[in-house]
Image (cartoon, helix red, strand yellow):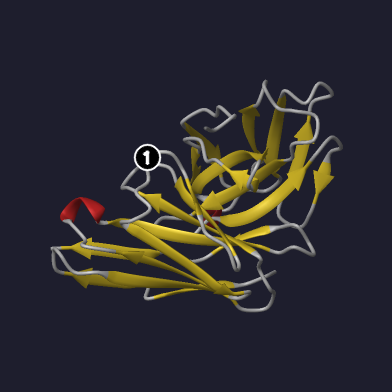
Amino acid sequence: GAVVSQHPSRVICKSGTSVKIECRSLDFQATTMFWYRQFPKQSLMLMATSNEGSKATYEQGVEKDKFLINHASLTLSTLTVTSAHPEDSSFYICSARDPLGGGQYFGPGTRLTVT
Amino acid sequence: DAKTTQPPSMDCAEGRAANLPCNHSTISGNEYVYWYRQIHSQGPQYIIHGLKNNETNEMASLIITEDRKSSTLILPHATLRDTAVYYCIVRVLTNTGNQFYFGTGTSLTVIP
């Protein structure tokens, strides 16, 4: 099946700094990618939909100025958590839709810890 | 918002079939049902999806009721490695495209 990668797999940053997470579709071109957040023992929560070459669409309650999304190419989307705080500590997961097959494939996730 | 409800947890004996139910009574005619599973601290893994007809692949079978208001995922011979959280998702068409909204899922424990 199609492969989606994320980098880094885990990151620790200090409060007030920014951190960037990359999501790549390795063997297909994804015009649409999605970003999710998952807190411990909870389900995945959709944060935003990222469309190549256009602005991301954020779900209600997600701060677009805090979670910056860039989808500059058909194989790469990035999520930047700006001015991170401890409450931003979470598991961030991306997914990419294969426009040909229609499937949606998830990355392995990035564990962010803000100290 | 998620359009599915699932039991929070289930147990299954190793080697037996695991039948995971899902209710999606508000599903629309063109919305697909997808199943994913998530093993602890990993990204969700695709299992199967369907619209109206029953589907089968190397991992599982998906049985969708005729009225499409519920479905059942069947793992024919559960193994210990099938222990995971299983999510039933209705793919929703919005003005920004097709999106997945995850519900709470079913935590399946396969018992030796």
Query: What secondary structure is marked by label 1?
Result: loop
- Residue drawn at 75 percent across, 63 percent down: A99
At label 1, which amino acid type do we have?
Gly
Query: Where, by quadrant of the figure, is residue A17 drawn?
Result: bottom left
Using the rendered image of the protein, determine whether residue B111 is visible from the camera's viewpoint: no
- Percent from the top left, x then y, of residue B12? 55, 38
Q: Taking A10 as reference, is B69 above or below it?
A: above
Q: Is residue A56 above or below residue B1?
A: below
Circle 1 packing at 10 Å, graded few (<14), some (14-19), many (20+), is few
Across and down, in percent, residue A19 comes to 28, 71
Q: Position of residue B67 (x, y in %)?
A: 81, 21
Q: Residue at x 67, y 52 (%)?
A: B47
Q: Nearer the viewer, residue A57 or B63?
A: A57
Q: Is residue B90 visible?
A: yes
Within the image, what quadrant is residue A88 found in?
bottom left
Occupied quadrant, residue B93: top right
Q: Is residue B32 left or right of residue B82?
A: right
Q: Is residue A101 left or right of residue A41?
A: right
Viewer-closest of A90 and B37: A90
Q: Chain of mark 1?
A: A
Residue beneath the point at 37% across and 76% down: A8
Q: Is residue B12 above or below residue A48?
A: above
Q: Residue B69, how many percent across, how many down?
A: 72, 23
Q: What residue would you read off at disc 1?
A: A61
Q: Is residue A17 left or right of residue B59?
A: left
